[in-house]
Image: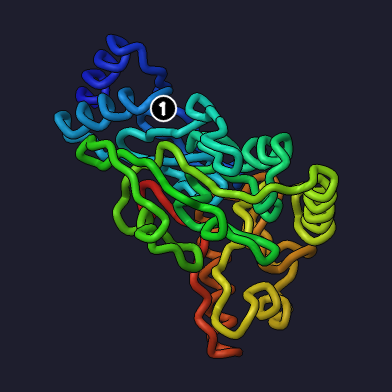
Amino acid sequence: MAVISDLTDLLTQKNIKFLLNEPMFRHTTFKIGGPADIMVMPNNKNQIIDILNACKKLDIPVTVIGNGSDLLVSDLGIEGCVIKISDMMSDIRLINDITISCGAGASLSKLCSFALKNNLTGLEFAWGIPGSAGGAAYMNAGAYNGQMSDVLLRCHHITLDGKIGYIDKQNLDLSYRHSAYTDNGYIITEIEVELYPGMRDKIHSRMDELMQRRKDKQPLEYPSAGSVFKRPTGYFAGALIEKNNLKGKSIGGAMVSQKHAGFIINTGNATCNDVLKLIKYIQQTVLENDKVKLECEIKAIGRGC
């Protein structure tokens, strides 16, 4: 694409890191996905604004990703420019005794470790969730009776028109796997969380306990995108799938985990199409037998999705 060449010229001038025809399986926890035409990794807000302005001028579609922990990318890849908010934007600092500012590209594990180091409690539930801080805020990630809405104070962002802004907690519209950002499409650049003073030993013990529960109950030894389906009202998706004897059900290289039926794992050579077919099969089976409609928690993106 000639316009991609124009974009690379600008990125080179601005000293912004980029990769051409970058395989997306390298950037998702599912280890699935064809090439992005161009992947750009900004290290500050100004670079994001430069990228957005250039893509708008050149009419290049933009896709924003974080750690790729809830993504299923097409085997045909992604058209246009992928902006990856990575560990190049991962600074973490204390604003005051109980408030942490965290770059959107920082891993949740890094944020949890920082809270532990500063004797702050409230984020233990997030220890082991394989996502970025920005991605966790975007989807109001949660586990073990905790979620980001419990601790989020403010999110800073850049609009798709390149404007800098923020949204305070009362306007974040946080609900189950939802925030204002799942609707507005803005790029989260930094989050602020408000925690509580705690005792380091107790915080550490709780983190260890939850990590062991994850290891015992989740197929962490295989690539996956975590829980495939949202929790339907009055039910648990994994329990419904197990009830229908779908543990171990496979299509191509995609398989319903034997360890946790709410997970689809990549057994080594799964394609996006394998996963999509298996998701559809699960949904149809549960709907037919239990009259429950399972809604996907993971997001399919890219050509043909």
Q: Position of residue 222 (x, y in %)?
A: 73, 48
Q: Is residue 199 left or right of residue 4?
A: right
The foreground one among 148 and 211 is: 148
Q: Quarter holding the N terminus? A: top left
Residue 224 sits above or below residue 259 on the image: above
Secondary-structure class at tag 1: strand
- Disc 1 crowd rating (10 Å Cα; few below 14, some 14-19, many 20+) is some
Q: Is residue 204 left or right of residue 282?
A: right
Q: Is residue 238 left or right of residue 209?
A: left
Residue 39 sits above or below residue 9 on the image: below
Among the 4 quarters of the image, the one containing residue 261: bottom right
Dot 1 amino acid type: Asn
Residue 18 sits above or below residue 131 on the image: above
| Residue labelled with disc 1 | 21
Let me know if residue 45 appears in the view.
yes
Disc count in the image?
A: 1
Q: Residue at x 60, y 52 (%)?
A: 225
The foreground one among 98 and 54 is: 98
Q: Residue at x 84, y 54 (%)?
A: 209
Q: Residue at x 21, y 19 (%)?
A: 6
Let me know if residue 27 appears in the view.
no
Q: Position of residue 187 (x, y in %)?
A: 35, 42
Q: Quarter holding the C terminus? A: bottom left
Q: Residue at x 47, y 47 (%)?
A: 73
